[in-house]
Structure formats: structure tokens, C-alpha cells
Amino acid sequence: MAKKTYAIMGATGHIGRILAETLLKKGHAVRAIGRDKEKLDKLAGKGAEIFSSSFDDVAGLTKAFVGSDAVFCLLPPGYAVDDYGPFQDKVGEAIKQALIKSNIHYVLNLSSLDADKPEGTGPIKGLYRHEKRLNSIPNLNVLHFRPGFFMENLLMSIPLIKSSGKIGSPLRSDLSIPMIATYDVGLKAAEILQALNFSKQSVFDMAGPRELTMEEASLAIGKAIGLHQLEYVQLSFQDAEKGMLSMGMKPKMAKLMLEMYQAMNDKKIMQQHLTSEHRGKTTMEEFAKTTFAQAMEAGRKKVMA
């Protein structure tokens, strides 16, 4: 396979790091774009060329993009942003202008299941606007990569587990949804970018091995962390909002998250049933034993320190 050059936005994040490291191991050139200098330096030690740039900096993104065979782009989470919708659009427009200026022909865009819906989906509707924005670029081949509910979202329940011995969210306990580990998303992204066999505007949905309810996820987590009777509690939207705000999330972002949870509870989103080609391999049990258990242990060590 011929060596290619890839520009990776969010290269220090859950997905971007796996993507960047996988491409480097395959012998490709990686331009790692991010803000965390320590994490960028780790990628540099593995052979990546690093670019410290804000995602709304057109000049910085253009510098990282130019000469690349393909770009992996994303709109970063903005829990501490006062108004996330306009932030999404600002970053999205910067990405668009940088892609045009650098004459990129292939883009893998990290989106989400149900990003084809313009309203009622919380932060996902910003991804809808971004997909339309990228589709408007002439002569661009773009694949909108739409994974389901990240298993890593469950890590936000750690403070509740520590304080009450319970796990909770606004989601219905019996709601079956497509969850996926970000590790699998990163691996699939690397596979797609190496092949570069998509054209014009296309979509790729993805989820984990099977759909799960929150009760099933809680059972797996409880076993992994030694709480075999870990109870799942459906939080009221009011209590969930208070919890989000206490964690530093801005009010407008919390409202968007609650809108997404309501749409999920109403089965208006996150209800796709996918074929094996569109499924990752990491089970909830494996995720609980590794990522979740490690996060719990890291929290204990931090408290003890």
C-alpha cells in the first residue's frame, strides 16, 4: 500500500489518537492537529508531525491540511462553550474555508447517527448543518461517518456512582440503543482513510456489536468495578440538568443534551439496526473491564493523592 499523508483534527482525543496511531503503524505520514501540547508531543514521539491550532483558525488549519491526501475533520465537543450551536457553525465554516484553500479532495467527517435530521436532536443538529456545509464544496469527496452513542458517555456517571453507588442518566432504562466504543470508531476511520474509495457525498453508519439498554450497560459496569448490584436510575430532566451544570456544562449546552435525550427516549433517534459491516467488535463487558474500570481507578488515585 502506497504511503499517504493524512491530516487528523482532534488527534489527541479518544478517536483521533487511535486513528493517528493506527495510520502511523501502517507507515503513513500523519499531521496531528490539536491543542494539548503534552499529548501532541507523545504523537510526535511516534512519528507524527504536530500542529497546535485552534479549530476555528483558518490559517492554522490550512497549514496543516495543505498537501494531505485526506483530512479527518470533526466539530469538537463544547461543554464549556456558552452557546454551542454558533460555536459549531464557526468551527465548521473555518474547516470549510481551510479545505477550499488547501485544495483537499478527500474528507472523512466525524458526524453522528441521525445527522440527517435538521431539528429536535440537540447537538446533533449542528452536525446536520456541517454535513450540508461540506457537501457544498465543489469537487470534494466526503464521507460522513455516523457512529452511534459513545460508550464513553457513560463515564459521566462516575461521580454519581462514587457518591450514591448508583448509575443514572435521563435515558429510559428499557431503551435499546446502538452504543459503540470510540476505539472501534478510530479503527474503522483508519480503514476508511487507507482505502479512500468513497466519492462525492456518502454516509457510513456504525454501532457496536449489539444494541443495549442502560440496565444492561449498568450490569456490565457493576460487575467490572465490583458493584454487582449497581442500580440504574432514570434521572428526571431537572436533576440531570443540575448534574450537568455542576460538572461545568454551560446552560445552553445542557438544554441541547436534554433535547437529544428526549428524542432518544421518544425513539425518534438512535434506532438504527445495522449489518455486521457497520459494527465494531468491542462489547460493553470489554469496555467496562478496561476503559470504565481504569477511569474509576484513576479517580480513586487522584482523590488519595
Image (tube, rainbow, N blue to C red):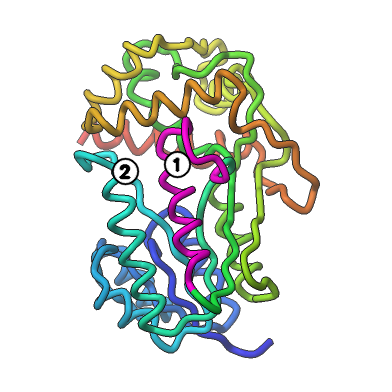
Looking at the image, which residue is at 52% across and 64% down?
135
Residues shaded magenta: 115-137
- Residue 80 appears at what percent x and percent y? 22, 40
**Residue 141 is a magenta residue:** no
In magenta segment, residue 122: yes
Q: Which of marks 2 and 1 is nearer the N terminus?
A: 2
Q: Position of residue 115 (x, y in %)?
A: 54, 45
User: As rendered, which of 291 and 49 lies closer to the eye?
Assistant: 49
Residue 285 shows up from this direction? no
Q: In the rendering, at what x and y percent does residue 69 appear?
A: 52, 83
Relative to 38, 95 lies left or right = right
Q: Residue 240 carries which label?
A: none
Q: Residue at x 52, y 21 (%)?
A: 226
Identity of the residue drawn at 31% across and 19% down: 241
SS category of the residue bearing label 1:
helix
Q: How many marks?
A: 2
- The residue under the point 56% across, 28% down is 224
The type of residue carrying mark 2 is: Gly
- Quarter holding the C terminus is top left
Residue 229 or 32: which is nearer the viewer?
Answer: 32
Q: Given contact means CB atoms under 8 Å apart, are the residues at marks 2 and 1 in contact?
A: yes
Q: Is residue 156 visible?
A: yes
Name the quarter where the N terminus is drawn. bottom right
Residue type indicated by callout 1: Lys
Q: Nearer the viewer, residue 121 or 19?
A: 121
**Label 2 crowd bin: few (<14), some (14–19), many (20+), radius 10 Å:** many
For the residues labelled 2 and 1, the Cα–Cα distance comes to 9 Å
For disc 2, the marked residue is 85
- Which residue is disc 1 drawn over? 125
Measured as percent of width and height from the top left, residue 165 is found at: 41, 12
Seen in the picture, residue 93 relative to 99 is either above or below; the reply is above
Image position of 56 with respect to 178: above or below:
below
